Image: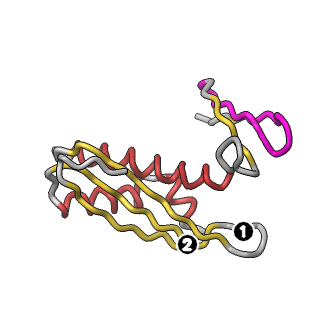
């Protein structure tokens, strides 16, 4: 099924984004009143892989209590300034088997996450992870 994303110019470099479901948010080229367009790509990657990891860990019957994903990207200096390096840091909370966490991340990055598959065409993607005790709340 095709996906529709619409942006309407508001003022300056500010745009109102609307998803096909009607969700709205602000995109701002200056990053003063909203998220920058390239940041949205990293948010998309973080969200895509986080969803996968939660689903896979639950299917593995792992007692996952929390997942935080931090993504850092480096861009080329020349236009179109694509991402050339991306590091994904996973903070996974619960009494989890490290091998199953690593497998969930690997499956997400190599098989399921569409955002990862697209960004991998221009960027070297690496990852790291930490398993936090169930009482820890990552920030």
- Name the side, left or right, on which 15 lies relative to 12: left
Residue 55, located in which quarter of the rendered image? top left
Which residues fall within the magenta stretch?
6-21
Number of dots carrying numbers: 2
Say which residue label 1 marks.
81
Which quadrant: the N terminus? top right
Q: Are marks 2 and 1 in contact (CB under 8 Å)?
A: no
Decide whether the magenta segment is chiefly helix, strand or loop: strand
Residue 38, located in which quarter of the rendered image? bottom right
Residue at the limit of the structure toward the right, as seen here: 12
Residue at the limit of the structure toward the top, as seen here: 22
Say which residue label 2 marks.
85
Comparing 77 with 125, the one in front is: 77
Residue 129, image x, y percentages: 31, 63
Residue 11, located in which quarter of the rendered image? top right
Helix or strand or loop: what does disc 2 sit on?
A: strand
């Amino acid at each position: 099924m095709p996906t529709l994303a619409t942006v309407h110019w508001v003022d300056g470099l500010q745009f109102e984004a609307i998803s096909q479901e009607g969700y709205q948010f602000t995109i701002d080229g200056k990053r003063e009143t909203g998220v920058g367009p390239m940041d949205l790509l990293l948010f998309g990657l973080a969200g895509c892989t986080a969803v996968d990891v939660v689903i896979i860990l639950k299917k593995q019957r792992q007692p996952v209590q929390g997942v935080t994903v931090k993504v850092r990207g480096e861009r080329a200096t020349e236009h179109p300034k694509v991402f050339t390096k991306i590091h994904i840091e996973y903070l996974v909370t619960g009494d989890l088997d490290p091998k199953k966490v690593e497998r969930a991340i690997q499956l997400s990055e190599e098989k399921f996450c569409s955002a990862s598959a697209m960004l991998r065409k221009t960027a070297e993607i690496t990852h790291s992870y930490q398993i936090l005790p169930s009482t820890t709340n990552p920030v």
